[in-house]
Amino acid sequence: MISIIFAVVVATFAVTLAHPMEKRQANGRWSLYAYGSNIDGLPIFYADGQAQIGNLAMSNATTKFPISLTFGDNQNTWVAHPDTTNTTTESAIFTTAGVASSTNLLGLSDTGSMACPVIFTSPNGQANNNTVAANTSVSTPQTNVWTFYGKYVMCSQDNVNFYAQPTGQDGWYILLWSAMADAALRNIPVTLRTIGPASG
């Protein structure tokens, strides 16, 4: 009896080892989608240097467009690229000193609030317009913090969770991060994934 149980355990272990683990994110471009209560895979987009969630047309940002991401200098730094056919204003925003590939990094801002905006910033730690929202200063954003767990976005900083801040309009939110549990009292906890709602 013991030998049969042992054989089953060994066979199960062998099958588990033979099954490949899920690959990490490919080196090509990917998009981000937010999932949470009544937020079923809404896309993340660029809005005046801020990461916002949902319906781009609802955002009151002056400059807004969909984005895709690639790895930067390492796999923990993510570079945003405009997904648009308009190559004037939108693309120019992501160009600093003529080196677009080293700007427009996805980052965690530190505004001193309980929950702070996720932003797009340049390597020197300044957002494109030095603000993430009206009258909110940016203080040294962290950009070398991103990683994947399968198709899920994770952060290397301790206890960081992501939130969707309601704007008063269904389908449009501000993407925030916080390491404080109380942030969930005013915001909707979300997970970020690289898979849109139609594909999983």
Image (spheres, rainbow, N blue to C red):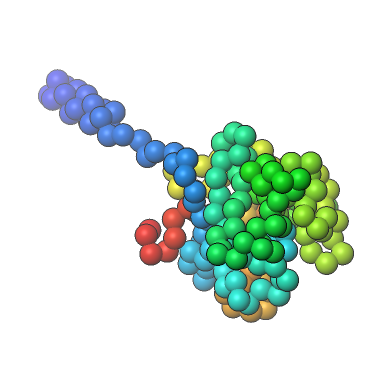
Whether residue 91 is situated above or below residue 56 in the rendered picture: above
Q: Quadrant of the C terminus?
A: bottom left
Q: Determine which quarter of the picture holds residue 82.
A: bottom right
Instruction: Report x, y in % for residue 187.
Output: 66, 65
Q: Which residue of the protein is positioned furthest toward the top in this rendering? A: 3
Residue positioned 71% across, 57% down in the render: 93
- Seen at 62% across and 61% down, the residue is 87
Closer to us: 91 or 113: 91
At 38% across and 64% down in the image, what residue appears? 198
User: What x and y, as percent, mark residue 39?
Assistant: 52, 68
Along the horizontal axis of the image, is 17 left or right of 61?
A: left
Where is 170 relative to 15, above or below? below
Residue 100: x percent and y percent? Answer: 66, 47
Picture coordinates of residue 29 (x, y %)? 49, 48
Q: Nearer the viewer, residue 57 or 88?
A: 88
Q: Residue at x 64, y 43 (%)?
A: 101
Give the side of residue 131 with respect to residue 105, left or right: right
Q: Where, quadrant-wise, is the N terminus in this rendering?
A: top left
In the picture, measured across the screen, residue 101 lies left or right of residue 121, that is: left
